Image: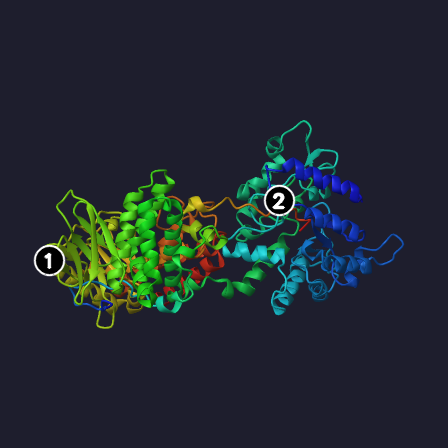
Amino acid sequence: MPIPHGFPKDGAVNTSTTPATSSVKAHRVPLTKIDVHSASAATTLGRVLPAESARPVQAPIFNSAL
Amino acid sequence: MAGTARLRLVCEEFGRALSGIAALDLRIHTNGLQLSSRYLDLFDEFGVRVGISLDGDRAANDRHRRFADGRTSHPLVLAAVALLRSEPYRHLYQGLLCTVDVANDPVAVLDALVELEPPRVDFLLPHATWETPPARPDGAPDAYARWLLRVFDHWERLGRPVPVRLFESLLSTLRGGPSLTESLGLAPTDLVVVETDGTLEQVDSLKSAFEGAATTGFNVFDHAFDQVAAHPGVRARQLGLAGVSDSCRRCPVVRSCGGGLYTHRYRERNGFDNPSVYCTDLRELVDGVEGRTAPRETAPELSDPAELTRSQQELTRILLARLHADLAGDPDWAHAWELLAAVERAGEAGADALAAVLDHPFTRTWVLAALDAARAGTPDAEEAARRLTALAAAAVLRGGLELPAEVAYRDGEVYLPTLGLLRLGEPGTEGRAALHVTDEGYAVRDGRAEHRFGPAAGDARWQPVRTWSPGPDAAPVALEDLDPYRNCFARPPRLRLGTGEAEEWRGRLDRAWALLHEVVPEFARAAASGLTTLTPLAGGPRAGGWGEAGRHGPGALGVPYEAGVRETALALLTGRRRTRLRALTEVADLYALDGQWQHRSPWRERPVPVSRLLADVHERVAVEAYRRATAASEPGGSDRIHQALDRLSEAAELTVTGKRLVAELRYELKTVDA
């Protein structure tokens, strides 16, 4: 039986008061399926783990070619 | 020109020489006139991708690309593109490169290119320098910007049917990302040309600046690539901001244009230490693209608290998955990870419970600390596995799940995130224990006996996390004085509060909260949004009595326990402002190249990086509102904030999202001033 939320003052807590949990969880990638090597994960990690962000180098191609 | 036999030899030699050393990416660029099945069969065999120069529709093409006798080359180019687009060659189709001529109709040019379904397109400004300026038929200094912006508008109207390198580069840098082409931005350019005679040269476009501009004096027979990499001309392209002219360094769009193509900066008097000869065009182009796209390109987390929450939750999950990549080989960690995965698979109750324990702000603290340790070469897999097991167990208990909830304890106790501290043995002992849910709470099996505990009432073995209610309609906030990872603030946390102390603190928090809602209701509502956890800190209030944001998830705040009501109110207000800005910077790009420029600050003696100036302003707007409302405002306080906002508005580091935040701060200050 799930423990109900909203205990009296001295009770256990509900720290999941954030609003969007139920609306987004259906679209979540399961923890075990997260690809931490994907480009989007690298961008996400790069903001908080500076060591993960690679030196930004321009695409190695001349202006006069594609 | 080379013929298929020679090209085959080139492809074979490159492949052989680089086999096992580097990935080989072969591309060829051509006007298409010679392109036939013989060439394309060869390119197919070696995976050589083909780009074609085409300036647009027939009228555009014929302006510069006629045969010597005046005949049009357009049908031949179209035939080459048609062949390239057909099977089995289509996968080799790299795209179309179009040189701008402002005499052409930009809409017709884009339509003609799009009709050929290229995988990508780019527009090139014609080569020009300050010595040989570009043609400007109407004399306007921004003719190229206006032409390109008309292309951009049409590209937008068509729904961006093809990636355009020039536009995508601008959109990337405006968002805070890297530039995507050699002709724009500050990212280093790693290019060297090996001529067919073996000489090593700089990029070919330099040849249009002056005779010998691309020369390095090196060749493949006598010199290593490291030597050419050290050539001053090549190094100049690696210097980022230091590699552009002084006026470019002070320009707010330099991150996007990067001073333009190196070649276009040339002036005989002082070489390349100039803005681009297209400077006016580039400024107008960057501003034009920004003005057209800023509302859409602004990170949604800035204006939508639910989106910020979602992104923060995703960040914690990705960080945890990243930690798993480091520790997956440890058996204890692997076991704990499987327990956590089982919780997530246990339907909606499992997913909700997992979300609750992952949202616990000090889960982030733990994951970051564990990643730091792994990165430093000193991973503590045992401690990490212990915490992960406790996390999974807490989720099982919260969700009332029929899953194993075994925890490892140390020093006789285990902290169950979001729930409380459970004593399982004498101090100094360690071991494992199995927990489960009962009708009224939880239980742990201890030999034959079953000890029931929690969730609400404490006993000799169970200390629950207490809560405080900010109001009748507000969710309870945890008063977190148990989690070992709460020690992440600038000052140490208080040890577990006594019952009387907790009650006193709740009283102070009640009064501080009421004061905030009375004097700055809008700011108080914003401060309440997403607040889940308050940690009492040791010592009295610092000068100013401001609250603490540490290295934790966005729901937490540290408040000095000894602070009085007014100081507590200010701590809640400023601490939440700091937390919000930190949360934003963790999931959205507000600025790029932070620290490359130093800005004068009205509040600090030495110049500061843009991140510091923004953080100071973000906090002081709220403080100014509070001080005004409590008749304690500082003389000139608002003026100083305006000065800082003016500086931020001109800062090259800010992205479209950062600029939007600055605009919001201006609006907030305006309402305060009013």
Q: Residue furthest bottom?
A: B473
Q: CA distance from mark 2 to mark 1?
A: 75 Å
Q: Residue at x 63, y 69 (%)?
A: B158
Q: Position of residue B287 (x, y in %)?
A: 56, 59
Q: Nearer the viewer, residue B138 or B654?
A: B654
Q: Which residue is mark 1?
A: B459
Quarter of the rendering occupied by the C terminus of chain B: bottom left
* For residue B553, above or below residue B268: below
Q: Residue at x 35, y 53 (%)?
A: B616
Q: Tag 2: residue type?
A: Asn
Q: Earlier in the sequence, mark 2 or mark 1?
A: 2
In this view, the mark in front (2 or 1): 1
Horizontal placement of B291 versus B222: left or right? left
Horizontal placement of B131 versus B622: left or right? right
Q: Residue at x 48, y 55 (%)?
A: A40
Q: Nearer the viewer, residue B567 or A44?
A: A44
Secondary structure at numbered mark 2: loop
Rendered image quadrant of residue B206: top right
* For residue B598, above or below residue B665: above
Q: Position of residue B425 (x, y in %)?
A: 14, 48
Subunit that carries the residue with mark 1: B
Residue B646: in sight, yes or no?
yes
Q: Nearer the viewer, residue B412 or B432?
A: B432
Subunit that carries the residue with mark 2: B
Horizontal placement of B94 versus B548: left or right? right
Rendered image quadrant of residue B449: bottom left
- The number of numbered badges drawn on the structure is 2
Q: Which residue is mark 2?
A: B274
